[in-house]
Image (tube, helix red, strand yellow):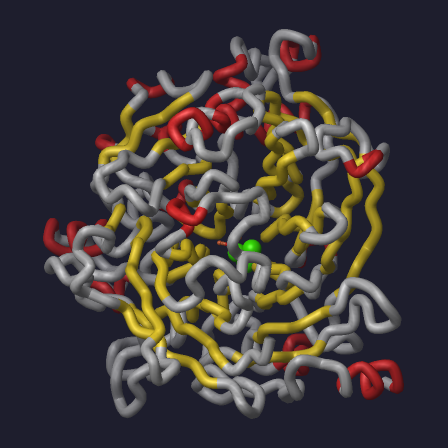
């Protein structure tokens, strides 16, 4: 407690207390502007989607000013780039049918209901600008950039598993949770809970399963936000699992690696090492091929090793059988399409639901949010820090330690999305599920929060609360403008436990008796 009091003097904000209010609560001197919410007109008749998750801000001038290997979401690392005008790529993870189509879970959906739902998932690209009065807004007139990618958009697959199930074309992108950005100025959107979609209601959404290739979902999708006509691509070389996120790092020799988590209880952390090196940042078409081929590894935390998931060199994959005695894999495509089974066959370490992963901008260490695993009695999760041998991103061994542990002592539970600022401070949002929020062992935290951590010095690992979300919401997708003066944030699933459209548990952001709407905000007030 003494350390906490001393540290507060040097914090960039005055911490808030936990809250159960139905609003986005911020420290004194900070403000949020609502950029877009579910159903917002994109300017061309299409609609902004539901349940925003990952956000990535691309300064509008970044291709002209020249790329660098420091990713743009680190606050105040590129003072030459615009921090008042850019493209915001937004993931739309999933839908709440009641809020989209009025469907409340009995009987078959109509074609119109299904159609409405399909247009609320996927991604948006929106042009966002900051006025001379300091307020942010969504410029709906920029129809040259504003774009929707949804469950009907044609998307191609690349890599060794691209031909499965009649590939290489998929219909839409599903379960887009968190993601990442590349040094060559594209976004990576991760398909997480794809298993919800092709199934009939009530376990799935009741869409037509026959049109969705079974293994066309669960991949990392690369999108060029600057080119509205470009086709997104799903990179099968990076494996198929419940992809939470991807964090890209470039080694000193141009080796590109990507860290990824499989957000399922008792699933693994992965690393992809691309074959093709990054040698010329200006060669965007060439660089957009980097994630099409490479080696995939799974983490063995017991031995501090990265295990190669390669069918041809790992005999244990060639002989692995399922519970009925059938061979699990006959090719690398099979290994990639069921990555977790391959990782288990090679004795990688199952961990407690890896959510976001981020790379420390100053020392290259890798921070992993393990959100919780109630099946193991891990109710509040932890944040783990991995360090590659010799700080080489392509190393095949690593060390790890625990950075912070959730619980009433530390003030947070269930860490999810992470983002660093340019000084190396870690910002983390929590995801206590709505059925548990404000109850029992979770009551101490109130609604889900946004927390700040120093990563070095005497206060390292101490959580200070910066924000509290509306009722039954989870804050997602934190990302910075290059000057570090704006934090973009999504408010996902406010009021998701509402029993009906007349018994609503949240009215955010409009208030009154309005239905709750997920949305995206810009938070300002940071003094840099
Ligand atoms: Fe969609 Fe693992 O969060
Ligand atoms: Ca998440
Ligand atoms: Ca992140
Ligand atoms: Ca979560």
| Residue at screen point 31% across, 20% down | 167
Horizontal and vertical percent position of residue 31 = 46, 85
Horizontal and vertical percent position of residue 289 = 44, 25
Instruction: Kindly tell me whether residue 280 is visible in this rendering.
Output: yes
In front: 113, or 423? 423
Q: Is residue 270 left or right of residue 32?
A: right
Above or below, 294 against 126 in this view is above
Above or below, 511 against 300 in this view is below
| Residue at screen point 32% across, 65% down | 128
Instruction: Kindly tell me whether residue 499 is visible in this rendering.
Output: no
Quadrant location of the N terminus? bottom right
Q: Is residue 446 left or right of residue 9?
A: left
Horizontal and vertical percent position of residue 459 = 83, 73
Q: Is residue 499 left or right of residue 414?
A: left
In front: 365, or 436? 365
| Residue at screen point 27% across, 36% down | 230
| Residue at screen point 32% across, 58% down | 95
Above or below, 169 against 12 in this view is above
């Amino acid at each position: 407690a003494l350390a906490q009091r001393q540290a507060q003097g040097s914090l960039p904000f005055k911490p808030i207390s936990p809250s159960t209010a139905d609003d986005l609560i911020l420290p004194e001197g900070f403000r949020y502007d609502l950029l877009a919410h579910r159903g917002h007109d994109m300017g061309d008749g299409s609609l902004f989607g539901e349940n925003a998750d990952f956000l990535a801000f691309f300064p509008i001038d970044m291709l002209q000013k020249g790329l660098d290997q420091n990713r743009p979401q680190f606050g105040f690392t590129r003072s030459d780039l615009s921090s008042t005008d850019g493209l915001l790529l937004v993931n739309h993870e999933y839908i709440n049918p009641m809020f989209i189509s009025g469907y409340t879970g009995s009987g078959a959906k109509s074609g119109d209901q299904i159609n409405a739902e399909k247009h609320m998932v996927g991604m948006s690209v929106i042009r966002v600008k900051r006025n001379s009065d300091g307020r942010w807004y969504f410029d709906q007139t920029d129809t040259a950039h504003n774009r929707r990618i949804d469950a009907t958009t044609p998307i191609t697959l690349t890599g060794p598993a691209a031909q499965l199930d009649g590939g290489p074309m998929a219909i839409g992108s599903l379960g887009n949770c968190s993601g990442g950005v590349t040094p060559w100025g594209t976004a990576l959107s991760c398909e997480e809970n794809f298993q919800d979609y092709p199934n009939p209601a009530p376990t799935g959404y009741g869409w037509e399963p026959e049109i969705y290739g079974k293994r066309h979902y669960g991949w990392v999708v690369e999108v060029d936000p600057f080119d509205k006509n470009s086709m997104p691509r799903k990179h099968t070389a990076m494996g198929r699992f419940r992809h939470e996120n991807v964090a890209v790092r470039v080694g000193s020799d141009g080796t590109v690696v990507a860290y990824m988590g499989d957000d399922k209880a008792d699933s693994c952390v992965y690393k992809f090492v691309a074959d093709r090196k990054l040698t010329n940042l200006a060669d965007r078409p060439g660089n957009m091929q980097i994630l099409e081929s490479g080696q995939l590894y799974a983490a063995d935390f017991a031995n501090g090793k990265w295990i190669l998931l390669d069918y041809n060199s790992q005999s244990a994959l060639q002989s692995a059988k399922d519970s009925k005695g059938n061979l699990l894999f006959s090719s690398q495509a099979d290994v990639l399409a069921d990555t977790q089974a391959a990782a288990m066959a090679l004795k990688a370490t199952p961990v407690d639901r890896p959510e976001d992963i981020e790379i420390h901008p100053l020392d290259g260490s890798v921070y992993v949010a393990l959100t919780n695993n109630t099946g193991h009695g891990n109710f509040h999760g932890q944040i783990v820090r991995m360090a590659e041998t010799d700080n080489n991103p392509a190393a095949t061994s690593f060390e790890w330690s625990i950075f912070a542990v959730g619980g009433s002592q530390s003030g947070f539970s269930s860490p999810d999305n992470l983002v660093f600022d340019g000084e190396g401070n870690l910002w983390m949002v929590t995801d206590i599920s709505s059925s548990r929020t404000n109850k029992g062992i979770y009551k101490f935290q109130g609604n889900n929060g946004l927390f700040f951590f120093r990563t070095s010095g005497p206060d390292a690992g101490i959580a200070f609360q910066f924000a509290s979300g509306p009722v039954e919401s989870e804050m997602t997708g934190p990302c910075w403008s290059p000057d570090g003066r704006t934090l973009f944030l999504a408010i996902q699933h406010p009021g998701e436990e509402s029993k009906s459209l007349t018994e609503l548990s949240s009215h955010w952001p409009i208030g009154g008796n309005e239905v709750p709407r997920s949305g995206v905000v810009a938070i300002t007030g940071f003094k840099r």
